[in-house]
Image: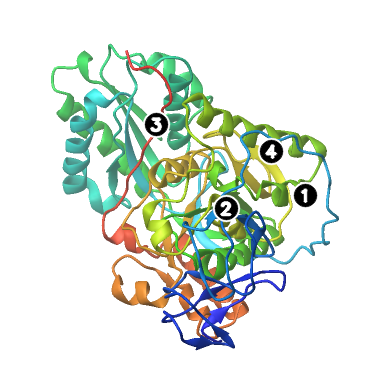
Amino acid sequence: MGRLLKINPLDNVAVAVEAIKKGETADGLTVSDDISFGHKAALCDIRRGERVIKYGFPIGTAVIDIKKGQLVHSHNLKSAVAEQMEYEYKLKPQKKVERTAAPSFYGYRRSDGGVGIRNEVWIIPLVGCVNSTAEELARRANECFGAKCGGFFAFTHPYGCSQLGDDHENTRRVLAGLCRHPNAAGMLLVGLGCENNTLSGFLPLLGEYDRRRVKALVTQSCADELSEGTRLLGELADYAAKQERAEIPASELIIGFKCGGSDAFSGITANPLCGRLTDIVTGFGGRAILTETPEMFGAETILMERASDRETFLRLAAMINGFKSYFTAHGQAVYENPSPGNKEGGITTLEEKSLGCIQKSGSAAVTDVLDYSERCRKPGLSLLNGPGNDIVSCTNLAAAGAHMILFTTGRGTPLGAPVPTIKISTNTELAERKKNWIDYDAGEILAGKSFEDSAAELLSLTLQTASGKKTRSEQNGSREMAIFKDGVTL
């Protein structure tokens, strides 16, 4: 590979795979500006108003004339994402997917038939007022019963009271999704007693549930909530101790995909690598979930052409325009997405970020569109509505049923999630500098490693993780959660 990477034959910009100084010639192009690692150089003259092409698609329009060899970035390129669009159903012929035999992993078969890849006990506060109680219960239980299961974990949040409408329902749906998650062998619900999200109002969201697996504590109703909670956690620990790993076909895996702290190589190495894993997993009947609705803006028509039917297309179009309306209702531009870190890493516009983001979807057909925290229902690729914020979207994926999350990053982050989170670096420098954060280095692809070899390695790591191998974030104790909020707080 040379010093400049042209991703698609249609592109009029190339990405610097190493820093290039002004006046240097790289791969036949003499650059007239310093081009930092991950940033773009113009391969030809681009006039003001003309489209800048990367990945074979427009990533915005030039705001001034750009000369061949110049840096292309925020000073001369702007987004062209529109606030609302009318989409036409144009189903693109899909390549026939040959179903492949599924490998296996060793997970836990639950009493309801579901599958978990961890055997933990989770403590879920129904309201933020009992967060400290939940954390103290987790500490005590780990001391007393930690050897009986995969650990006790409290997932704290500030909600469950003083919320109205959709915010209240979002909180309840996320908590219910976590309560149903099969990675937890046992679940203790901790309420206060006077909150809006009362235990009696919340339990019906779970439907039929195994009372050996789900216990509840209302702290206002007992004299010593810590003693009573510890007793209940002891019962859950005994139940978890009876669970044993068994061989399970990987067709039952649900894998979530997320990118955060992206750089210009996210869409070149790590995200396309995840796309290959999406194709592999859905090819043997598994499920993949892609979220971050705002990071589909500008690339959504590519996904729409892969909708499995008209109904799925219509739900996807409604999801995109609905999230744009959320932006405009708050007086915000729909295209103001790339963060300062993204831009420093070489990403200029939302379209550029989105085209890189959706590489994680591979070439799989879109079989379903899910609302925020809605449970994954169908084999294949599902698109999950929700924001791009790292903690919120990882929680969203977990509530939707993802057994694990493959999280790509070019800048690096220690973030964890309620479920195992495999961190994949887009470049080797990050992988070597932050070994305590990164599980897999996709940057080796820039040095000539094939996508096929990398995909085989990533699949192996995925199956090992499903069978119990701890991710870096698990080893570091990073298990954050956050719930989407949009409305009034009383």
Kind of residue at badge 3: Val
Cα separation, mark 3 vs mark 2, equals 40 Å
Q: Earlier in the sequence, mark 1 or mark 4?
A: 1
Q: In the rendered image, which residue does mark 2 sit on? A: 354
Mark 4 / mark 3, whichever is N-terminal: 3
Mark 2, secondary structure of its residue: helix
SS label for mark 4: helix
Q: Is residue 106 above or below residue 448?
A: above
Residue 316 numbered tag? 4
At x 54%, y 33%, the residue is 372
State the image quarter where residue 385 is shown: top right
Q: Position of residue 479 (x, y in %)?
A: 32, 48
- Disc 1 residue crowd, few under 14, some 14–19, many 20+, Cα 10 Å: some
- Gap between marks 4 and 3 measured at Cα: 35 Å
Q: Secondary structure at mark 1?
A: loop
Question: Foreground: 131 or 233?
Answer: 131
Q: Which mark is residue 305?
A: 1
Distance (Cα) linking label 3 and label 1: 42 Å
**Mark nearer the N terminus (3 vs 1):** 3
Numbered disc in front, either 2 or 1: 2
Q: CA distance from mark 1 to mark 4?
A: 11 Å
Q: Amino acid at mark 1?
A: Glu
| Cα separation between marks 2 and 1 | 16 Å
- Residue 375, given in percent of the width and then of the height, sits at 57, 37
Residue nearest the viewer, comparing 124 with 270: 270
N-terminal of the two: label 2 or label 1? 1
Q: Which mark is residue 214?
A: 3
| Contact, mark 2 vs mark 4 (Cβ under 8 Å) | no
Q: Residues within 10 Å of mark 3 (few under 14, many from 20)?
A: many
Going from the N terminus, do you reach mark 3 or mark 2 first? Answer: 3
